[in-house]
Amino acid sequence: MSTVDRARLAGLHARERQAFLEARPRSRALAEQAAAHMPGGVPMSWMVKWPGDFPVFVAGAAGAHFTCVDGIDHVDLCLGDTGAMMGHSPAPTVEAVTHQLARGITTMLPTEDAIAVSSGLAERFGLPYWQFTLTATDANRHAIRYARHLTGRSKVVVHNWCYHGSVDEAFATLGPGGATTNRPGNIGAPVPTSETTRVVEFNDLAALEQALAHGDVAAILVEPALTNIGIVLPDPGYNEGVRELATRYGALLVNDETHTICAGPGGYTGAHGLQPDMLVIGKSIGGGIPCGTFGFSQQIADRIATSVELEEIDVGGIGGTLAGNGLSMAAMKATLEQVMTAEAFEWMVPLADAWADGVQAGIDAVGADWHVTRLGARAEYNFSGRPSRDGQDAHDADDFELQQYLHLHALNRGILLTPFHNMALMSPATTAADVDAHTEMFGACLKELFA
């Protein structure tokens, strides 16, 4: 836990909660109205985790800002937790989607846009074949099912404190003696995760080899850099070691780039020349329109083609009626070709560095034992004086009470951070002034907190 005066923290938090209530009467009224038919007054349960006594209701969002129903403008450094990484409603995406709306939203038939999207993804990520879903969660599930089908094995290896959407196999952590246990908060697990999953720490190749040596692992599902427990960067050679072990033990390697796409237009895989068997991505590539996709190698495509019967191809657990719909395809084509470009990252990454520099300056000014980690267009601070090397390390550095206060302090000054961690993400529409606003706010916040 962080070495802050808890009584002082509680007093400051109470002040910020009161300021939040006074500044947002319209959001408060809507939250009370919403509670009549939505638990917690929110359309999805995790939205209650935002700081403050109720969620902020959005009136409109554009670029890197949004305005709430109380008329307050906000710098958005959350950006839909990567869903709006390319900015809210980028013009090329809006134009393409508007055009497609008049031509049909979903037909269960391909559109010409699908050809351009799959070709573009193949070029970015180096995998020749692609299939489409509505979320990265669905794509991860499909990748796991194919891996089990093709290998005849049952188990999946994941990293400790990973996150891959609502994939059942990934809600597992390391227990005593290296045993797999259900992650705290794992609601309604269909079976104990010890039956489906082996968990290893990030950056521990020896543990990974031990997990694979059983001979029953179908897939290694990984982020090439952890992002959802705080940013944890790989040791030099780690991802290459994972690739070598997957090949040696006959498991398929699945890189989940849903968040690590912040590393560049080809994600961490493209930036570092990684060679997964399958790759999953969602959220950002549709510019805000729901989408997901998974790519795979020629060898996997050939094995699927010869082992899945046409008569049963629609009932094998792969697909979905809305998957590959015309609207999502139009959004992905426009976003990938005109928004998520190399030039965009040339703007975004230096801004993330400037944000990280500003945060580090605020930390240094008060002598806090905290650290900032950078990953392309994303940066994050944690409550430890050194970078985390694995998921447990990052988890142990967390401080939920402190995090809630810092986020509420920022929100009361018109700056939104991701509610689940201390992450800031840059978009092509983010400006130096947006970053400077956070730097000024954060420095003043820490001076008061550590006074």
Image (tube, rainbow, N blue to C red):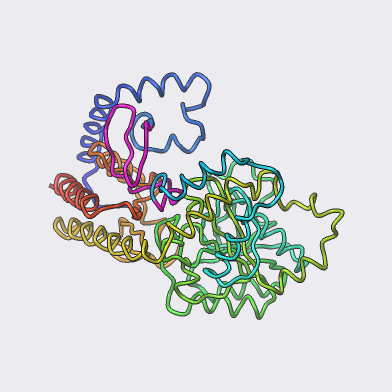
400 over 343 or under it: above or below: above
Residue 212 position (above or below residue 350): below
Q: Is residue 282 left or right of residue 51?
A: right
Q: Position of residue 38 (x, y in %)?
A: 52, 25
In screen coordinates, is 321 left or right of 402?
right
Please name whichever residue, 125 or 438, is drawn nearer the observer in this view of the structure: 125
- The quadrant in which residue 242 appears is bottom right
Residue 338 in the image: state x and y as whole percent: 44, 58
Residue at image position (30%, 60%) is: 352
Q: Is residue 228 visible?
A: yes
Using the image as rendered, state which of residue 400 and residue 162 is in the foreground: 162
In front here: 187 or 152? 152
Q: Is residue 278 above or below residue 213?
A: above
Residue lying at 46% horizontally and 26% vertically, measured from the top left: 41
Kindly indicate the quadrant of the structure image that contains residue 303: bottom right
Magenta residues, start to end: 58-86
Q: Residue at the location (33% across, 39% down)?
A: 66
Instruction: Specify whether residue 48 is painted magenta.
Output: no
> Which percent across, then down, holds residue 310?
84, 57
Quick check: is 79 in the magenta stretch? yes
Residue 171 visible (yes or no): no
What residue do we see at 28% from left, 29% from top? 71
Q: Position of residue 304 (x, y in %)?
A: 77, 66
Q: How many marks?
A: 0
